[in-house]
Image (cartoon, rainbow, N blue to C red):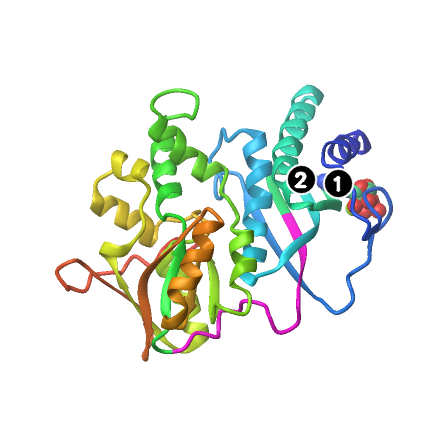
Amino acid sequence: MEFRLIDRIRERTAQGREDVRLGIGDDAALVAPPAGQDLAIAIDTLVEGVHFPLGTAPADIGWKALAVNLSDLAAMGASPAWALLALTLPRQENDALRSFIDGFAEGFARLAQPHRLALVGGDTTRGPLAVSVAVHGFVPPGQALVRSGARAGDAVLVTGTLGDAAAGLALWQRGARVDEGDGRAAYLIERLHRPTPRLAAGLALRGRASACIDVSDGLLADLGHLCEQSGLGAEIEAPLLPFSPMLLGAFDGEVARDFALAGGDDYELCFTVPPARVAEVQGDLARLGCGATHIGRMVEGDGVRVRDGLGQWLETARRGWDHFAP
Ligand code: ADP
Ligand code: MG
């Protein structure tokens, strides 16, 4: 049975890559890393009820499990190549199992294919629904976008828009779904279930961004990590935060700001560049379609401070989604 499931996954995610010597089916995969490149490796787990809500479509789970990992590669400036998939599946009827696998593999493949990512192996076990994906990518030595390279005075930028996914989750929890209701709710829920990893932006930032992180747990928490690793603080101007028209159509500005600062799941890139390079980098990311907004700057000190339009510092006690918060 399990082998048939694995066959279904293999057929649906097939991706020809010359550097895969041996893919799914043996005791281990064999791959040929390119000479002269560093390997960038990351793994992330999604647990039902924690990282995606109950009732999430299998195809959305497949997409998101890969997307959150590709986002980590994007944040390193790496280009993706191979993935491993560990699936923990609840005991269920064969039909239900097959339909879950088919949907999951379709969502996974839809994101994997345009990035030429090959699924080369994995593991399948019984238990409460959980999905781990490990990804491998390449980056030229010395060019990875680390969190620790920011300098005082660097500009802080963020790709795309913030807060959409947290808004999507709020709407989902109120019963909204993509195929019913208005287009705003559909857009925001899609941003929750089908985040877009900013891989092209990550490549464009190689050799230019001084530091970079992907925003998975809200801007305060993730920019906070970048600050900590760089030994600096950051000052953010709340009126500059980029919001989608769909978010501002569905929620008022203060709620949108909270979603952006303390919500999660946006998978945009937050990065720093010397002030003299802001315009050039913004031009390049605009051409790539996601754009980048200048939201603040790095300063001596520590922590992230946010100023409102009147110049008042906001109370930012809510530090984003913390899995280990009491
Ligand atoms: P082993 O007992 O040697 O680990 P498995 O039965 O776990 O073998 O796996 C058989 C083959 O199928 C291996 O090549 C493994 O990488 C692959 N595989 C297992 N589960 C998955 C999965 N969920 N996705 C992709 N490949 C998988
Ligand atoms: Mg195994």
Residue 134: say if magenta. Answer: yes
Q: Which residue is mark 1?
A: 15
**Residue at mark 1 to residue at mark 2: CA–CA distance:** 7 Å
Asked whether the beta carbons under mark 1 and mark 2 sit within 8 Å of each other, the answer is yes
Specify the label residue 34 is tagged with: none
Q: Quadrant of residue 322?
A: bottom left
Which residue appears at 20% of the width and 61% of the height?
Answer: 314
Given residues 132 and 29, the one toward you in this image is 29
Identify which residue is drawn at 70% across, 49% down: 83
Mark 1 or mark 2, which has the lower sequence index?
Answer: 1
In this rendering, is residue 221 above or below 265?
Answer: below
Front-lying residue, 29 or 90: 29
Amino acid beneath label 1: Gln
Q: Position of residue 139 (x, y in %)?
A: 65, 64
In this rendering, position of residue 188 left or right of residue 203: left
| Left-right relation of 93 to 213 | right
Residue 290 painted magenta: no
Give the dominant element type of the magenta stretch: helix, strand or loop.
Answer: loop
- Tag 2: residue type? Gln
Which quarter of the figure has residue 292? bottom left
- What element does badge 2 sit on? helix
Residue 316, percent across and down?
26, 60
Quarter of the image where ligand 1 sits:
top right
- Residue at numbered disc 2: 113
> What residue sits 16% from the left and 58% below the top?
309
